[in-house]
Amino acid sequence: MFVQKLFEKKSGKTLLYFATGKRINGVTKKTLVERIGYLEDLQSQYPDPIAHFREIAKQKTEEAKDSEFDLHYSSAELISFSDGFDKSISQVPEKTDLMRSYGVLPLLKIYRELELDYFLDIKRQYRKTGYNHNHIFQMLVFGRILSPDSKLGTWRERNRLLSNADFSDDDVYRSLEFFSSVKNDMVRHLNSQMVNKYRRKTTLMYYDVTNYYWEIDDEDELRRRGASKEHRPEPIVQMGLFMDSDGLPVTYGLFPGNTNDVITMRPMMDRLLDGLGNRSYIYVADKGIMSGMNIAQIVLDNKGYVISDAVRKATKAMKDYVLDQNDYIRSEDGSFMYKSRFYPREIRVETSDGKIRLIKINERQIVFWSEKYFNRQKHEREKAICKALKRSLTNGAGSVLNNHAANRYIKKMIFDSASGKEVTEPEFMTSIDSELIAQQEELDGYYIIRTNVVGISEDSCKEDFNGYECRWHAADNFLELDRPVTDLDIIDIYRGLWQIEDSFKLTKSVLKTRPVFVHNEQSIEAHFLSCFVSLLILRLLEKKTGNRIPVKTIVESLRKANLVELPNGTFMNAYCDNVINDIGKSMDLQLNKKFYSKKDLVKERGKTVKKI
């Protein structure tokens, strides 16, 4: 190995590399091994940079000689098996698998940083079992990320993921009840680790609900038919998820598939208090989540909220305020505008005797118009109108009387309705409802954000908050932060809700959380617990790489990061890319070597034990 100098035209500097040379057919072929830095920059650190790094190159040459090995193999050698495959005898093929995942190393490091191994070892110490719950949970989490499959399928590939996989498939299924029983404690443990080690921000809490389907026909107490987000007919389970402002999952809860999204909010608020403690939260959610009862509970708990609301379903007074162009603040490029007001609002709440009553709350209302949202609504309506026009040409033949999608723009009138005679086969005359279209066009691009969060007032100072980030105003039910909070700040807070939608997409596409193959309630809870931990690890890995690499790209590369065991016990790197290289650098792991000895792999696994 030697020091190679290369002049870089772009910077006008000389770049130093460690390089190797090999003579092939009388010509020396040079290979750049490692970038050192610019000679001009290094001269301030070393009297003679060239001489200094030449000495290091000699040391590297000696180290390389010690790590060289010869590989001998015979092309005539065959892989032998005891018997052929017979479905009446064996369900699993006998195989020789020399592939090992090294993509598991960064996942294992985060797993140990979160002290999940320590947590599970403490929880299982009084369980008299012949298997290790921690190793099984590692398999479920790492398998969910690197090769998502059923529990049995993951167990069959366990040797690729784990160095210690001495447990049976029956042990895996037996351990699910244990994981379910420690779920709440594990979530509390994870939140404690996130606050202490990763400085989790706990003020903003984003909430949303999704559901997951089972490919079964019969329902039970948990798996029920309901409003599937994927418009599937199978039984589903609802899952509510809280996420912090960095996009990191906080806690989750499962509900029967026929549970309305609105009803899940208050139980999940209790779970949040249980997992993180009673803090000053600001709940952020969509209009479909926040009912009057949920808002009333938030106010009673002295917490904050930021929610959206549809303009088209607002009162006439609110619509008039939205359409009044006075007081709007417009962006320089005209792409958005907004205005706000403080205004009392009536919400519907249910009393203890089951009656509905209206109560008044004070609210900060922000109206926002976006050109992007305007164009999207216009495009969606134009598609629906095209469908409506096609149906109107056939006088509604083949369509049903409803008020959904394109049919909302069709007006249908029954002929001879004044004759008083029973019409067994009515005919219809259809036309486009231009009045409805005009009403909707007028409100395109607008939406409302409602909140009780305000910034520090002129007559307040930071000392009034006693070191806390916010304080509650009992007189007007506002949550005051210790800094100015503009309308744009509230709008940006609400926009962060997209991250939770992105997390749901990750669980369904990348982690393949559904369809689910386990059936009893405890096994289902354990399945979603492993998926929750998998999502948290991936989000932390995304954060450790500076949020430069999308989670999907990270997973695609880690799934290909495999080693092949050679006959002499050395392992050859079968795949590497710059994503894996960046992950290794950010986590202090050597993931770009062409060959690894067993000693090298032990060393890299040893790095995963280091605490932060």
Image: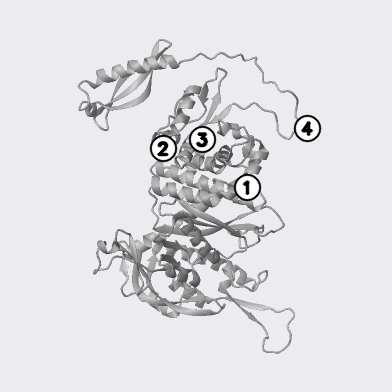
Above/below status of 435 relative to 303: below
Q: CA distance from mark 1 to mark 2?
A: 30 Å
Q: Amino acid at mark 4?
A: Ile
Mark in the foreground, 2 or 4: 2
User: Residue 494: percent from the left, percent from the top?
Assistant: 41, 61
Q: Which residue is mark 1?
A: 177
The label number, if any, that marks residue 611 in the structure image: 2
Mark in the foreground, 1 or 4: 1
> Looking at the rendering, which quadrant does residue 401 occupy?
bottom right
Q: CA distance from mark 2 to mark 4?
A: 48 Å
Q: Amino acid at mark 1?
A: Glu
Q: Secondary structure at mark 3?
A: helix
Q: CA distance from mark 3 to mark 2?
A: 18 Å
Q: Which residue is mark 4?
A: 89
Left or right, residue 129 beside residue 206: right
Q: Secondary structure at mark 4?
A: loop
Q: Which residue is mark 3?
A: 104
Q: Amino acid at mark 3?
A: Val
Residue at figure coordinates x 69%, y 78% from the top left: 427
Residue at figure coordinates x 43%, y 46% from the top left: 193
Q: Earlier in the sequence, mark 1 or mark 3?
A: 3
